[in-house]
Image (cartoon, grey):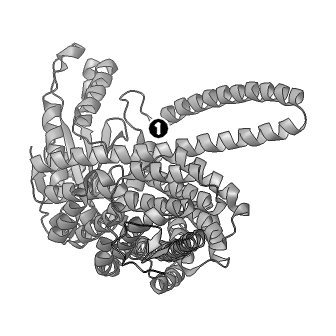
């Protein structure tokens, strides 16, 4: 047999002089297929390993998570359809939380939810849509996907995946402003055999819910337990959330230094998460705490860093707090124009935040009503189609009647409440309403460490106006006084008519000098009232007394008493003037033998 040298691969059926037979060709194909199968199996195992690693660190190690996703993308061509959907699920997580593109992240998670037939992955994708929708403030979508995921729990094989949904529910209902439901789900996870990671997040949800429900005591037991779990599981996000709630609790208890130290130490962790809302939460709390401690520079730095996060923190309490801090700083520095501009931003941010709260409440009520209706419909369907239809008509009519009845009752209650709270002549709050609102505002101011002041004023010679020109003219004067002084008050202030010709204003966030200036502006404007409109020509003046929390504390009765003393001092000094209760005035009241020193503005 003659051998020939093989030249390249010109003769694919020969090697050397041997002609390749069918057996050889089949054997080669089998070998190549086996090799490809081994390579695919190897790649599949590697993909599963990387998926497990990425899933384990997605909330604890941002850099590693992103790196692992990059490796998975490189192997996606050899991945199974199920593995590709798992990669898409993790990519949705990254897109929303680390690229700050929630709309795309939610769309990606929805696509996984729709495509996958695996109950575990569908369950997790539904949870992710719920979580991201809550952050995006689309609570209606979030509720739908969350409840759908919870229904799937019985079909899910992975116990931790089931607990994952329960943890998501706890976090979600905290975001919805439903702390009771949040606490129920958090305790369910903590009492079950969930992983340390999920117990960590459940601990942060429990602490947040208990704080909102005012259930936290002086003990830090739940915080300590949560921190211990989270540090061991290296879950940065949940750890920072625990710190944020605990810092608020300590601040409420007067432990501002501890709160500042805690959050300052957590800042590197917060920055590492690259999650804008979490960064804003911590920095805004720090700005508030540092302002209360008198650290203006630190407070301003944290507030501005919060605002610089931009649209990512729109409609959040953090943005409201940051603008409020900067507004107060500008006020303290006497930068009136900047303070006014910052106050406008603060008011806009607060309006957006309150609108967000209202949207949550409406979404939850709509969902709850829809759920109840669905349950009613299912119950009626079991009894037969005809009965169900008749019952539905009856229920709808009944619902319409109830709604109409509730609307009428609500309207009637509103009218009665307005009558009970309003002085019918001037349209201002009456004494009861003024007292109620002022006491609440002073409690809030005391907690936040913010100043407040009270202005009380009484019209000069008002009885003479009534006696000389009649009660019609007197009533006209009272209305004009109410309008004039209202124009000098902000939305956060409370102006009320507390007696016949006596008025009072509680000024939130203003110190004694600022309140005295406002009182002087009111005094000046009252003196300019043109009384010819009522048919007579005379001058309207008033005497003002001013007190502040710096000297009088946050007790309303003491503020009123000190302002009243200054009002009568103004009367005795010749009327039509402003007298303020200063430190010297307080000392004079304790030492009656001294000739008192009086702070007088205007006159």
* Quarter occupied by residue 189: bottom right
Q: Secondary structure at mark 1?
A: helix
* Quarter occupied by residue 341: top left
The one nearer the camera, 35 or 67, is 35
The one nearer the camera, 24 or 45, is 24
x, y percent for residue 392: 79, 29
The one nearer the camera, 36 or 427, is 36
Q: Residue at x 11, y 52 (%)?
A: 600
- Whether 398 is drawn above or below 238: the answer is above
x, y percent for residue 338: 12, 49
**Dot 1, crowdedness within 10 Å: few (<14), some or many (≥20)?**
some
x, y percent for residue 527: 14, 31
- Residue farthest along the right direction in this orientation: 383
Q: Which residue is mark 1?
A: 421
The one nearer the camera, 251 or 164, is 164
Residue 578 visible in this rendered orientation of the protein: no
For this view, does 121 lie left or right of residue 595? right
Q: Residue at x 60, y 63 (%)?
A: 165
- Residue farthest along the front direction in this orientation: 1
- Whether 511 is drawn above or below 421: the answer is below
- Residue farthest along the top direction in this orientation: 535
């Amino acid at each position: 047999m003659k051998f020939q040298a093989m030249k390249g691969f010109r003769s694919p059926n020969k090697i050397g002089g041997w002609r390749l037979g069918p057996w050889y060709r089949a054997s080669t194909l089998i070998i190549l297929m086996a090799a490809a199968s081994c390579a695919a199996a190897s790649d599949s195992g590697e993909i599963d390993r990387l998926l497990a690693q990425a899933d384990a660190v997605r909330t604890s190690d941002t850099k590693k998570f992103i790196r692992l996703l990059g490796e998975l993308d490189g192997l996606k061509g050899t991945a199974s359809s199920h593995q590709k959907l798992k990669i898409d699920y993790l990519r949705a997580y990254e897109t929303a939380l680390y690229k700050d593109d929630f709309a795309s992240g939610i769309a990606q998670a929805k696509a996984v939810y729709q495509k996958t037939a695996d109950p575990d992955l569908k369950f997790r994708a539904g949870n992710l849509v719920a979580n991201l929708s809550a952050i995006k403030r689309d609570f209606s979508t979030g509720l739908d996907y969350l409840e759908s995921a919870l229904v799937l729990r019985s079909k899910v094989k992975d116990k931790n995946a089931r607990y994952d949904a329960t943890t998501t529910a706890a976090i979600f209902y905290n975001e919805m402003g439903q702390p009771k439901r949040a606490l129920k789900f958090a305790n369910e996870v903590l009492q079950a055999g969930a992983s340390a990671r999920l117990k960590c997040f459940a601990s942060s949800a429990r602490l947040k819910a208990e704080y909102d429900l005012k259930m936290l005591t002086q003990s830090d037991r739940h915080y300590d337990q949560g921190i211990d779990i989270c540090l061991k599981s290296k879950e940065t996000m949940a750890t920072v959330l625990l710190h944020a709630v605990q810092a608020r609790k300590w601040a409420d208890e007067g432990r501002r230094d501890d709160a500042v130290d805690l959050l300052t130490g957590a800042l590197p962790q917060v920055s590492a998460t690259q999650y804008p809302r979490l960064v804003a939460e911590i920095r805004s709390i720090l700005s508030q705490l540092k302002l209360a401690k008198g650290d203006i520079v630190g407070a301003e730095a944290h507030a501005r860093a919060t605002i610089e996060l931009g649209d990512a923190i729109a409609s959040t309490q953090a943005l409201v707090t940051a603008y409020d801090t900067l507004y107060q700083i500008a006020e303290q520095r006497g930068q009136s124009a900047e303070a006014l501009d910052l106050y406008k931003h603060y008011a806009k941010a607060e309006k957006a935040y309150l609108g967000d709260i209202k949207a949550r409440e409406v979404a939850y009520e709509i969902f709850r009503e829809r759920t109840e209706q669905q349950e009613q419909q299912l119950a009626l369907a079991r009894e037969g189609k005809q009965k169900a239809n008749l019952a539905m008509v009856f229920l709808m009519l009944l619902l319409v009647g109830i709604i109409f009845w509730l609307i009428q009752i609500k309207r009637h209650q509103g009218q009665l409440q307005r009558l009970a709270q309003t002085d019918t002549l001037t349209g201002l709050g009456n004494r009861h309403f003024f007292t109620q609102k002022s006491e609440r505002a002073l409690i809030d101011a005391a907690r936040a460490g913010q100043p407040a002041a009270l202005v009380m004023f009484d019209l000069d010679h008002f009885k003479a106006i009534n006696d000389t020109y009649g009660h019609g003219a007197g009533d006209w004067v009272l209305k004009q006084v109410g309008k004039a002084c209202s124009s000098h008050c902000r939305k956060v202030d409370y102006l009320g008519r507390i007696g016949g010709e006596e008025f009072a204003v509680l000024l939130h966030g203003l110190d004694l000098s600022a309140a005295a200036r406002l009182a002087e502006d009111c005094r000046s404007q009252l003196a300019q009232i043109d009384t010819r409109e009522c048919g007579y020509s005379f001058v309207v003046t008033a005497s003002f007394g001013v007190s502040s929390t710096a000297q009088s504390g946050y007790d309303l009765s003491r503020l009123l008493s000190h302002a009243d003393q200054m009002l009568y001092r103004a009367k005795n000094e010749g009327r039509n003037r402003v007298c303020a209760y200063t430190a010297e005035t307080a000392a004079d009241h304790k030492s009656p033998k001294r000739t008192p020193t009086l702070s007088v503005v205007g006159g």
